[in-house]
Amino acid sequence: MNIHRIYGPLFRVYRSRRLMLFYSLFMPLENETLLDVGGSSYFWRLCRELGLTVPRVTILNLGTAPSELDPQMRWIVGDACKLPFADRSFDYIFSNSVIEHVGDEESQMKMANEIRRVGCNYFVQTPDRHFPFEPHLLTPFIHWMPPRVYERLVPRFTIRHWLNGAPEDDVELSGIRLLDRRQMQCFFPDSHIRTERTMGFSKSLIAYRSGNKP
């Protein structure tokens, strides 16, 4: 079973709201530059569907560019913890659900420092560790378990595994390091922190810095 068929429509709702928040904070113009760290063309196709202005987008990802990439977009293979750009190279940095995937605390700090260095303004989203439902594994409470218990449960006892039938994917996801508000503020000390809420819980956190020009 393809799990994206199940939660894809719900993700579209949340991502549309997130995109509208980004535009309400920054209002990027067509001639301005944006670096999407660890992303894809998804958000920027969604922009067009929502009738929003699309800036000059560069996507940086570890994987190679997909064949359907919009010719107006640029794709660079690179590491989020070591961005191959000069200081203040982009008007905006956008990163959605990436920083929790890059490794340990030191790697997350490196990614945050690179974003702050390269972007005049930034918008970095990550799931909130205090939300009771782990969004990658589609399983409640599992991310609150002690590390040794968590690592044993991930390959066998997650909703994602039962739906997807791909235990190797779940093992890879065991390396996720979710963050809380305090940690995000520590990584991005010059930012404001916004909270996305669902059913009264903080679902995800957004660190953003705005109002800066090259």
Image (tube, rainbow, N blue to C red):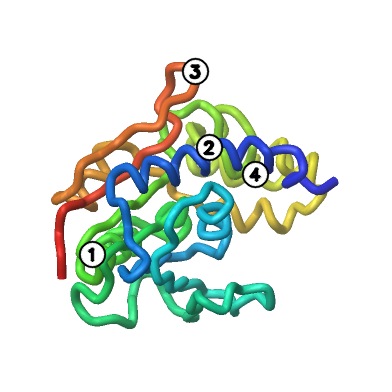
Pointers 3 and 1 in contact (C-beta within 8 Å): no
Picture disc at residue 113:
1
Q: Is residue 179 left or right of residue 210?
A: right
Q: Earlier in the sequence, mark 3 or mark 1?
A: 1
Q: Is residue 13 above or below residue 94?
A: above
Q: Residues under labels 2 and 3: Cα distance?
A: 13 Å
Q: Is residue 36 left or right of residue 69?
A: left
Image quadrant where residue 122 sits = bottom left
Where is residue 85 drawn, in percent x and y?
29, 81
Q: Secondary structure at mark 3?
A: loop
Could you classify mark 4 by the number of other residues whose Cα lies within 10 Å: few (under 14), some (14-19), or many (20 or more)? many
Could you classify mark 3 by the number of other residues whose Cα lies within 10 Å: few (under 14), some (14-19), or many (20 or more)? few
Where is residue 140 drawn, in percent x and y?
59, 28
Total number of numbered labels?
A: 4
Residue appearing at x 23%, y 64% in the figure? 113
Q: Would you name the residue on which mark 4 appears?
A: 154
Q: Secondary structure at mark 2?
A: helix
Pointers 2 and 4 in contact (C-beta within 8 Å): no
Where is residue 109 drawn, in percent x and y?
27, 60
Nearer to us of marks 1 and 2 is 2
Q: Would you name the residue on which mark 3 appears?
A: 199
Q: Would you name the residue on which mark 2 appears?
A: 14
Picture disc at residue 90:
none
Q: Secondary structure at mark 4?
A: loop
Q: Is residue 78 left or right of residue 180?
A: right
Residue appearing at x 20%, y 42% in the figure? 192
Residue type highlighted by circle 3: Met
